[in-house]
Image (cartoon, helix red, strand yellow):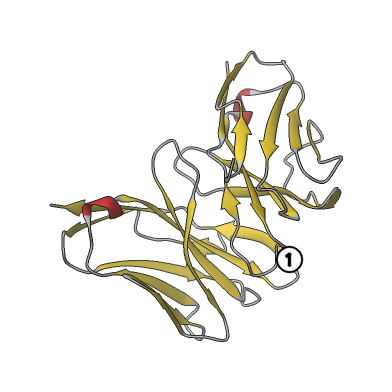
């Protein structure tokens, strides 16, 4: 069973607009969430994270929102840039269990 | 180097052959993880080390998979008698202490079993 779900396999956004990537989870024990970005033939690169004690974390153009009651998080990128085109993975972990559980990824394409 | 280094980048193995994949984590990182990523999927956890101790191997798909980190730095993932379903990208990641800290990934080893 997929404990972390990214239901949109792909997303296209105009350059300069906001990109919103969504992620849902089923395991209520998850308390730390991360977003990774992956270019072809490279390993995932850490983008931003959020602890379950927060509902928002911001880093430059990237903001992650966490809605614990809905078991939903989202990544907002604004403004979107061509270099943001990549596959984005949502991941989650539980305190005391260091392994990450990943979603299947969303391919983001920024249209110039 | 500054990042996680994996070798080889690409490996083609004949079915039944044994393979060994190497990971050099970031210096000083206590935690080391191995993940398997099949085409079109997200990475899936295989095993986790804290220093030289293998604390979790629950993700290893069969007893053909074996991982070690004897001196608490470099790690090797060994797959015996490879089968076609073992074809995937094998990713290594390291982190300072594992808990609620980001893990840094290597570029991966793409294994193709023919």
Above or below for A89 versus B3? below
Query: For the point 50% across and 86% down, which residue is it?
Result: A69
Residue A1 showing in the rendered view: no
Nearest to the observer: residue A13 or residue A15: A15
Residue at x 72%, y 63% (from the top left corner) = B97
User: Which residue lies most toward the front here?
Assistant: B1
Q: Name above or below for residue B40 compared with residue A79.
A: above
Q: Residue furthest top?
A: B14
Determine whether, in the image, residue B103 is placed left or right of residue B76: left
Q: Quadrant of residue A94?
A: bottom right
Q: Judge by depth and name the residue closer to the eye, B55 or B3.
A: B3
Residue on which disc 1 sits: A97
Left or right of B9, for residue B92 = right
The structure residue drawn at horizontal position 22% and vertical position 58%, both measured from the top left corner, is A81
Quadrant in the rendering for residue B16: top right
Q: Where residue A54 sits in the image (x, y, percent)?
A: 52, 85
Residue pictured at 57% horizontal, 63% vertical: A3
Quarter location, residue B81: top right
Residue B24: horizontal and vertical position, in percent? 68, 39
Name the side, left or right, on which A12 lies relative to A93. left
Query: How many discs mark residues in the rendered view?
Result: 1
- Please indicate whether residue B54 sits to the left or right of residue B60 in the image: right
> Mark 1 — on which chain does it sit?
A
Q: Secondary structure at mark 1?
A: strand
Q: Quadrant of the N terminus of chain A?
A: bottom right
- Dot 1: within a 10 Å radius of its alpha carbon, few (fewer than 14), some, or many (20 or more) residues? some
Residue A112 placement (x, y as % from top left): 12, 52
Rendered view: B108 above or below A50: above
């Amino acid at each position: 069973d997929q404990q972390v779900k990214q239901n949109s396999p792909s997303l296209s956004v105009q350059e300069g607009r906001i990109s919103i990537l969504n992620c849902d989870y089923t395991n209520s024990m998850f308390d730390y969430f991360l977003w990774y970005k992956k270019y072809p033939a490279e390993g995932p690169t850490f983008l931003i994270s959020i602890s379950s004690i927060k509902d928002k974390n911001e880093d430059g153009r990237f903001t992650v929102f966490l809605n614990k009651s809905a078991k939903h998080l989202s990544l907002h990128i604004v403004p979107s840039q061509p270099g943001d085109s990549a596959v984005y993975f949502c991941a989650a972990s539980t305190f005391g269990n260091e392994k990450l559980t990943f979603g299947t990824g969303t391919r983001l394409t920024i249209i110039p | 180097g500054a990042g996680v280094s994996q070798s080889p980048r690409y490996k083609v193995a004949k079915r039944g052959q044994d393979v060994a994949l190497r990971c050099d984590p970031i210096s000083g990182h206590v935690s080391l993880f191995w993940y398997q990523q099949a085409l079109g999927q997200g990475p899936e956890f295989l095993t986790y080390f804290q220093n030289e101790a293998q604390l979790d191997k629950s993700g290893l798909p069969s007893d053909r998979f074996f991982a070690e980190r004897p001196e608490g730095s470099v790690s090797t993932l060994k797959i015996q008698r490879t089968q076609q379903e073992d074809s995937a990208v094998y990713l290594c990641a390291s982190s300072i202490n594992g808990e609620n800290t980001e893990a840094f990934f290597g570029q991966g080893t793409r294994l193709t079993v023919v």
